[in-house]
Amino acid sequence: MKDSTRRNTNAFIAYSGFIVCVAVALLLIAGCASSPRFTKERSAEPRLREGSSPAKSLKTMEGIASYYAEDFNGKKTANGEVYDMYKMTAAHRSLPFNTKVKVTNLDNKRSIIVRINDRGPFRLDRIIDLSLAAATQLGMKDTGTAKVKLEVVEWGDEEYSK
């Protein structure tokens, strides 16, 4: 009787160990499953219909803007375009590429609309890097920086240039 009890105990321990190993393996596999990725469909964000204008901005933020020019002119931007400092473009850390943003210089109240085509700025105290053309129209070329208000007027499609 002692031998049969010992065999049952050993079988139970082996079976329990097997179950624990299977459970751990399943947890590891589930933990490695890919998370949902960004897609072209941004259902959680408001979209504008073709030809419509926003009643109000879709997102606003304030901070310091700077600009970048000659050192980057002709080089590729983060979305694959060639940077042209004479176009109305900008770099932002997180807004989708091709998002249109109204930028208002809070000191002189001048406003422009730029398209996001690059990532930056890389100084944490800044919220947007503008092209030379955009900085000139905002009246901040000489100072290099300005306190600005950003208003998203149209969400971009996150498309990269081909």
Image (cartoon, rainbow, N blue to C red):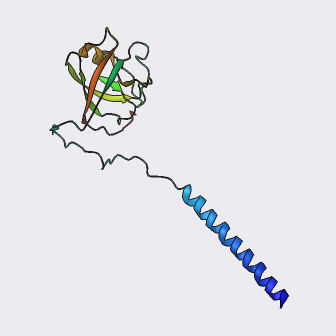
Give the residue at x 50% y 53%: 34
Q: Quadrant of residue 112?
A: top left
Residue at image position (44%, 23%) is 123
* Total residue callouts: 0
- In this view, the residue farthest toward the front is 2
Nearest the camera: 154 or 162?
A: 154
Examine the rendered structure and indicate whether residue 123 appears above or below residue 161.
above
Report if residue 143 is visible in the image. Answer: yes
Q: Can residue 87 be seen in this view?
A: no
- Residue 104 image position (x, y, % from top left): 23, 23
Image point 43% across, 29% down: which residue? 78
Q: Nearer the viewer, residue 15 or 9?
A: 9
Q: Residue furthest bottom?
A: 1
Q: Where is residue 110 in the image (x, y as percent from the top left)?
A: 20, 18
Camera-side residue of 83 and 162: 83
Q: In this view, does 33 lie above or below 53?
A: below
Describe residue 24's horizontal placement relative to residue 122 as left or right: right
Q: Which quarter shows the C terminus? A: top left
Looking at the figure, which quarter contains the N terminus?
Answer: bottom right
The quarter holding residue 108 reads top left
Q: In this view, does 12 lie above or below 89?
A: below
Percent position (x, y) of residue 89?
31, 24
Please provide percent x and percent y for residue 10.
Answer: 78, 78
Q: Which residue: 36% across, 38% down?
A: 159
Quarter where residue 92 is shown? top left
